[in-house]
Image: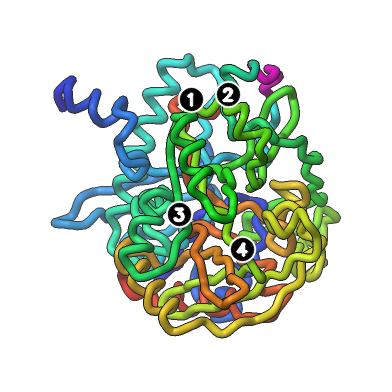
Amino acid sequence: MTVLIFAQDFDRSADQVVLKLNERNVPVLRIDTSWFPQKLTLNAELDGGRWVGELRTPHRSVALESLRSAWYRSPTAFEFPEGMNRAECEHANREAKLGFGGVLSSLPLCWVNHPNRAADAVYKPLQLAVAARCGLTVSRTLISNDPDGVRRFAKASKTGVINKALGTSRVLEEGVRKIGFTRRLTDEDLSDLRGIDVTLHQIQDWVEKDHEARVVVIGDKMFAVGIYAGSEASHADWRSDHDALSYGVLDLPSDVEKGLRAFMAEFRITYSAFDFVITPSGDWVLLESNPGGQYGWLESRTGVPLTDTLVDLLERGEPT
Amino acid sequence: MTTTETMRFYDDPLAPVSAQFPLTRPGLATVDNTESPSGPETRPFGLRHVRVMPEPVVPAYEYSRDQQVSVSDDGSETPMVKLSPNMEWSSITDNDGDEGPSEDWGNDFTPDYPVQA
C-alpha cells in the first residue's frame, strides 16, 4: 500500500518525509500537479462505488486502489503545453480540476489533509467562528470595507487595532515580490483610510503578548512550540524578523487542547498549524489556523518529532 | 449540466474554494507583473505598507525522479537534506524555508487562467 505525496519539487519537508518512508520500506509516490498533463497521466475507471486505475509518471506508477494515504502538501497549478490558445487552456484547466480533483478527492484514504476540507479551512472568518464555538479564545475582530466601521471598531478598542490579511500577504508587482506583515494601526492610518472601501479588510484588537506559540496538530498528537520575539518588529509579527526569534517547547493547557480537538473534528482535518498569542497573564488567544502550515523549522530548532509523527500517520493509513 | 448550474459553479464568487480542487500558487514563479501601485484611492489599504522582499535564494539542486527528493547538482545524487541538514533553506519569503522562515502553504490559488509551460 502506497503513500501519495502532493508536493513541489523543491520542498525540504517533503524530502524528509519521503526519505523516512523509504527507511520504513513504505512505498511512496510523490507528484506535483504541475506535472499534469505533460509528465503525469491518470487512468481512472469507476468500479462500483470506487475509482480504480492508475496514476503514472514517466518513472513509476501506482494503482489507485493500492493507495493507503495522501499528504496534500503543496501541489501547484496544472501546466499545459505551449501552443494552446486561451480558450483551450481554460477548458483543459477546468476539465483537469474537475477530473483530477474529483477522482483523487473521492478516494477513501487517510488524507493529510483532504483537499476540499483543507480549502474550506483556509477561510479565516470561518476559522474564528468555529474556534470560538469550540471554546478557544479569539481576538475581537472586524471584517469590513467601511471606513466608518473601521474607525468605530478602533475607537472601541482598549489596546489598539491591527490589520492582518485574510489570505497571503504576498504580492507581485513592479517586477518584484512584496510582502505585508501584521501591523498596529496608528492615528495617522486611521485618519486616512483610503483603500479600505475597495475590498474587505480584517481588523483585530491588538493582543498584549508575552510570547507566541505555534501548535502543530498531526492526527491526535499536538506539539506546542513557544516563539519568543527579540525585536520590536518580531514582537508585532514574528514572520517579519526571524533572526530575532528564539524557541522552546511548551505544555499545552488542557482547555486549549480540548478546543483544538473540537476544531479539527469540526473541519474534519488531520493536520494544522495554529498560531497563538500567550498574554502576560497566561491566556492563549488564537490568531489563526494554517491547514498547510510549515513545521520543519520548528523541528529543526527544538527537536519536536514532527516528521516522525507525520510519517506515523501516513504509514498507518487509517481513512479519514 | 445546465447553464445556470455552470454559472453557479464557476462564476459564483461565494462558491467554496473546495469546489475547485485548490492548488498552491507557485512559490518561485517568475515575477512578470511590472505594473505600479494604482493610487491611494484604489490601492487596498492592506497593501499600503507592503515592502519589497529580497529575491529568494535557491541552492543549486536537481529533482531526482528516482529518489523522489531534491538532490545535489554535482552528479552524486546526494539528497539535499543529507548534504546540508542544518542549512537555511531559501524559497518563498525573505529567506523562507522549512528550516528557517517559511510562508505557510495557503492552497488558495485557483487560477482561472491556467499556467502554460
Q: Answer yes or no: do the residues labelled 2 and 1 have beta carbons within 8 Å?
A: yes
| Dot placed on the residue nearer the N-terminal end, 4 or 1 | 1
Chain-order first, disc 1 or disc 3 = 3
User: Residue A319 placed where, x, y %?
Assistant: 31, 70
Q: Is residue A181 magenta?
A: no
Q: Identity of the amino acid at label 4?
A: Glu
What residue do we see at 67% from left, 55% from top?
A237
Instruction: Indicate the chain on which mark 2 is placed.
Output: A
Do the residues indicated by labels 3 and 4 lie within the same chain of the protein? yes
As measured in the structure, the alpha-carbon distance from the residue carrying label 1 to the one carrying label 3 is 21 Å
Q: Which residue is mark 4?
A: A208
> Disc 3 marks which residue?
A140
Q: Residues within 10 Å of mark 3 (few under 14, many from 20)?
A: some
Residue A192 or A141: which is nearer the viewer? A192
Mark 1 and 3 residues: CB-CB less than 8 Å, in contact? no
Nearest to viewer (mark 4 / mark 1): 4
| Quarter of the rendering containing residue B46 | top right
**Disc 4 + disc 1, Cβ < 8 Å:** no
In this picture, residue B50 sits left or right of residue A35: right
Query: Dot 4, how many residues are within 10 Å of its Cα: few (below 14), some (14-19), or many (20+)?
Result: some
Q: What is the CA distance from the residue labelled 4 to the residue labelled 2?
A: 27 Å
Dot 2 alpha-carbon crowd within 10 angstroms: few under 14, some 14 to 19, many 20 or more: some
Question: Label 2, on which residue?
Answer: A194
Tell me, yes or no, whether dots 4 and 2 are on the same chain: yes
Q: Looking at the picture, do discs 2 and 1 lie on one chain?
A: yes
Label whose residue precedes the other's in the sequence (4 or 2): 2
Residue type beneath disc 1: Asp
Q: CA distance from mark 3 to mark 2?
A: 23 Å
